[in-house]
Image: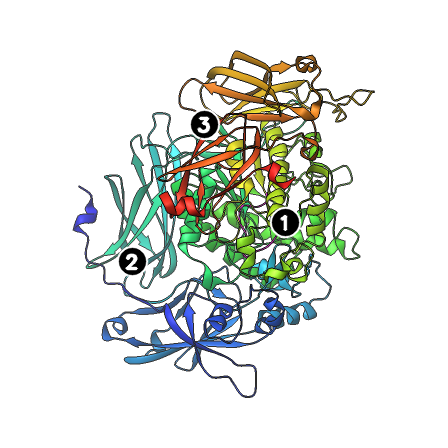
Amino acid sequence: MGRTDSLPNERMYRQSLNGTWEFRRTDEDQPSEWLEGAVPGDVYSDLHAAGVIADPYEADTELDVQWVGKTDWRYRRSFEADDDLLSHDRVALEFLGVDTVAEISINGTVVGETDNMHRRYEFDVGNHLESGTNHVSVGFRSPVEYAAERMEAHPYDVPLIRYPVDQPGRNFVRKAQCHFGWDWGPCLPGVGLWRDVRIVGHSSPRITETTVDQTHHDDGDVTLSVRATADVLEAGTYDLIASIDGETASRSVDLEAGTDDAEIELTVPEPALWWPNGYGDQPLSTLRLTLATGDDAHTVEERIGFRELSLVREPDGDGGETFFFEVNGVAIYAKGANWIPVENIRGRIDDATYESLLSSAAEANMNTIRVWGGGYYELDRFYELCDELGLLVWQDFMFSCALYPATDEFLETVEAEVRYQVRRLSTHPSIALWCGNNENEMSLVSWFADDENVDEFYADYERLNEETIAPVVAEEDPSRTFWPGSPSSGGAVGEDGELVPYDETRGDLHYWDVWHDGEPFDDYLTVEPRFVSEFGYQSFASAELLSTVVPDDQLNPTAPVMEHHQRNPGGNKRILQRMADHFRVPFAFDDLVYLSQLQQGLAMQTAIEHWRRCKPYCMGTLYWQLNDLWPCASWSSVEYEGGWKALQYMAKRFYAPVLVSSVRPGTDSTDDGPKELDLNTDDENGAVDRGLEIWLTSDRLEATAGTLAIDAYTFDGERVFSREESVSIDAQASRAVTSISDDAFGEVAPESVFVRTEFHPVGDVEVHPDFAFFESFKHLDLPVPEITANVEGTDVVLKTTDTALFVALETPALSGHFSNNYFHMAPGECVRVLFEGDAAGTELEEALSVRSLESTY
Ligand code: BMA
């Protein structure tokens, strides 16, 4: 039995100051009246709730509410202090998140200041409290004005990427960078108390932070080295007690007054191990840590998972270096997406959004999420869910697409931010990597390379990244890699001594040639990186979602409000231009949305199937981007409010543990490594070569054997050939298992035929059929399919008379998604899918409609 049962009672006093506050603007001669505001929350949400502004996401209201970010605000509330609180030796006012530049007062006396939304702040308020009613007040400076002032005072311009609707100076204030506008989001640089606020009274040491290091022994036992950071009022000897899974350790520790650390070790015999999604389970255990003295104690709990994790970077044959995560001795192929904030205004964030998005990621066979550096360190629930779902987290520090002023003041607040965040998050088993920034290293050699102050930029970058962030991470969490930036080759320099952030043979890559430079989808096949942490393609959100913010008469890609909800200049045009290559240009808006989503899915499928085939040379793909923070056209696979776009369904298929994919010979690499590619597979007479290599790619830890069924059909429904073969794929391997030669198709014209390959593995393994086409979709001789959909409870049974491509089940009035969608059906095929949502039976039947590619012809 652990000693925790006989601990003294905890006497600590905690009082939440969340809830209803009052707020008003303060920068005018006549301050406005006090309105009701919420904590946690933000001023935009509060102004909207009070009826002062329209919904900032609606139409182009965003433009009308830019004044909010240029305004000073005050929030205040009162609270009761009772004798119990006042009896404590220390009473602290604690803010887990103040956004951003603020002055805090208690009963009219200033007790502290803040300048960084990513830090925790705590102020001593014992001497300022009175028995009975007290007043706390937070005066916020306009973040836009503050940034402008700092920018002005700096001796030279510090460059940054600007967006169509934005406010300048974001790199001078430690606030979510995308609050100032981005190429997928609105500019709403508000203020607010965005995490919990509370009063804490204590008379004995209080644990403020806990970190846990794991040592895994050969016999399976795991030793935990636990460090508690405590706020100590009086130097002395205290009891430190740790317990987990029925094991307890305790020791006496000597602590100095002030902030001091105490350490304790305990060993857990052969705990069950935590695995990324798809590789095993995610057992989690609660560590209880108590710091006790005489008759008082403080206990905290941390939930941990037992796992060994490293980033493996070893020189290999090609003069390059591997780049992959290894968990419990197993090389993990990272499959996932980039995460942006779920909201640009805090008042709208809720746990349900995190739950829906992260479970959507896990359901789509993802195992890794990158928290991109232009937002904020996510709320606790995000990381808890990643632990529960087995999603590894690539965690950027919050610096993005800019350089930053390396003044002493700036570096000081960054140091505190990094220390706090690493301590806060490092106990989560899901955290896999700390990364310095998004695209800042790259910006030194690209966007800002020709600036006259480039030497200063290099020096500033070094001071911030290498001299401030990196050492704090090394000190606080030596168990994890600090990766200098994304993309990066790990600080490698070229012959001229210049940084080389782009190197296909090492590190991570952002590959944007297909979207930003307009290269065709096949261009992905020419690149063989180690780990691709960004690449993406845009699509439109559903008409239902867009209708919530766009007037009906503007549901057209080049109408002003639709263009306002597209932040990448020329983005809508690019979607349309590319659509004309692949599809017959539609005239109905919902067809346009549908085709744009298919197009996005096909781009990502081309890239990801290729980079999975390149395994183990390439060991990760994180596409840009999982989610959205308002209704818009963007690179997301899940639209704002959680609806799955076609890409999300396609991701579930192309990220399945075993992938069957086909490739025209000469257009892809083989497992012999990179080779010269000939993308022109037409012969000299313009005839299409229909030869195909069929590949199996497996992330499973055991070999997979089964039968490959390959069928070629004409669109008239005739089977041109049918073949079955026994094949197998080794554990964690990728190879071409068979091929089809061009002459297998006889005289059938390329636009009239397709190949369907299905792998039937022995055992219960998720794998989806592959389809190969030999002409662009707009040229195919598609028949008119008759598709029937019968609803049986939450199941929908689909049957088609003829070949139907990209069969889409749509339920605009319902929330939820299907187990499979946007799939192809061969003639006579019957498919059963499950609706995971809030309706079944007749209700589902009435809401359901079915579409296929032919209906857009
Ligand atoms: C990247 C990201 C984002 C951006 C996206 C799309 O490189 O890091 O800054 O939103 O591309 O342009």
- Nearer to us: label 1 or label 3: 1
Left or right relative to 594: residue 328: left
**Closer to the N terminus: mark 3 or mark 2?**
2
* 629 in the magenta segment: yes
**In whole angstroms, how far apart are the C-alphas of marks 2 and 1?**
75 Å
Q: Quadrant of residue 158?
A: bottom right
Label 1, on which residue? Answer: 588
At label 1, the amino acid type is Ala
Q: On screen, 787 above or below 572?
A: above
For this rendering, which residue is in front, 432 or 495?
432
Q: On screen, 184 above or below 672?
A: below
Furthest-bottom residue in this view: 30
Label 2, on which residue? Answer: 236
* 84 in the magenta segment: no
**In whole angstroms, how far apart are the C-alphas of marks 3 and 2?**
59 Å
Question: Residue 734: x, y in percent?
Answer: 56, 21
Badge 3: few (under 14), some or many (20 or more) residues near its Cα, within 10 Å?
some
Badge 2: few (under 14), some or many (20 or more) residues near its Cα, within 10 Å?
few
Question: Residue 481: x, y in percent?
Answer: 53, 40
Q: Secondary structure at mark 3?
A: loop
At label 3, the amino acid type is Glu
At label 2, the amino acid type is Gly
- Is there a contact, CB below 8 Å, between mark 1 and mark 3? no
Q: Secondary structure at mark 1?
A: loop
Residue 766, disc: 3
**Closer to the N terminus: mark 2 or mark 1?**
2
- Nearer to us: label 3 or label 2: 3
